[in-house]
Image (cartoon, helix red, strand yellow):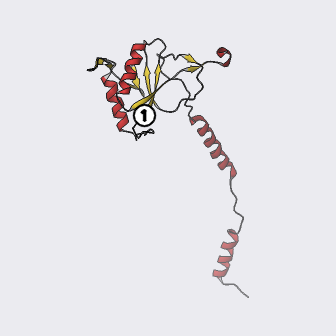
């Protein structure tokens, strides 16, 4: 039986596309390799010391790993809350306690921007970490702690560098 020109054309077209589809794995391997390197480079380590060169943390035999919380950095020259500079002028409140008003204002602002964490009593409490240079006087650290206690930040922890195992014994 003779085929029409349309039938011949359809047969040629089907024969051309009848081949097996191939998948180029080289491109996929390149993409996955780049993805693995990207994830390795950008994986964050929360145990990094502060990048502020003015702060030298004290050493300790602490065992707990710090959480990712609000950080206050205290050096001899500056007071930083999450890399935002704060005026460290101290004022006394009516009880005679030294408070840093700019720090109280900044902590209240940051507390208003995040969801509260409720403790067992149903009261809002938040956590912060103080990274203080080992040469900063205790009175300065105390003023920061008093200012933080005026806000919802009632859990205060201190960052330290962990001593090497042979130094502990």
Dot 1 falls on a residue whose secondary structure is strand
Judging by the rendered image, the residue that carries numbered circle 1 is 126
Callout count: 1
Image quarter (top left, top right, bottom left or bottom right) of the C terminus:
top right
Q: Residue at x 63, y 41 (%)?
A: 36
Q: Residue furthest bottom?
A: 1
Answer with the quarter of the image where residue 112 lies.
top left
Q: Residue at x 65, y 42 (%)?
A: 33
Q: Residue furthest right?
A: 1
Which x, y percent locates residue 126? 42, 34
Q: Is residue 32 above or below residue 46?
A: below
Residue 102 horizontal side relative to residue 32, left or right: left
Image quarter (top left, top right, bottom left or bottom right) of the N terminus:
bottom right
> Which sits in the foreground, 79 or 157?
157
Answer with the quarter of the image where residue 76 lies.
top left
Which x, y percent locates residue 21? 69, 62
Answer with the quarter of the image where residue 79 lies.
top left
> Which sits in the foreground, 59 or 1?
59
Q: Residue furthest front?
A: 121
Which x, y percent locates residue 38? 59, 39
Q: Is residue 63 above or below residue 4?
A: above
Residue 124 horizontal side relative to residue 101, left or right: right
Q: Residue at x 63, y 81 (%)?
A: 6
Which x, y percent locates residue 81? 40, 26
Visible residue check, residue 150: yes
Q: Residue at x 68, y 16 (%)?
A: 166
Label 1: few (<14), some (14–19) or many (≥20) C-alpha neighbours in 10 Å: many
Visible residue check, residue 77: no
């Amino acid at each position: 039986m003779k085929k029409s020109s349309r039938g011949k054309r359809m047969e040629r077209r089907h024969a051309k596309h009848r081949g097996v589809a191939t998948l180029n794995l080289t491109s996929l391997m390149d993409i996955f390799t780049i993805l693995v390197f990207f994830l390795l480079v950008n994986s964050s380590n929360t145990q990094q010391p502060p990048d502020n060169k003015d702060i030298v943390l004290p050493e300790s035999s602490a065992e707990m790993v710090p959480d990712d919380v609000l950080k206050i950095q205290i050096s001899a020259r500056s007071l930083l809350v999450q890399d935002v500079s704060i005026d460290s002028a101290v004022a006394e409140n009516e009880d005679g306690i030294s408070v840093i008003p700019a720090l109280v204002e900044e902590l209240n602002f940051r507390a208003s921007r995040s969801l509260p964490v409720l403790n067992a009593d149903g009261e809002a409490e938040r956590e912060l970490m103080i990274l203080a240079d080992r040469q900063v006087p205790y009175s300065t650290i105390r003023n920061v702690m008093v200012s933080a206690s005026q806000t919802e930040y009632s859990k205060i922890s201190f960052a330290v560098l962990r001593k090497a195992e042979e130094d502990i014994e």
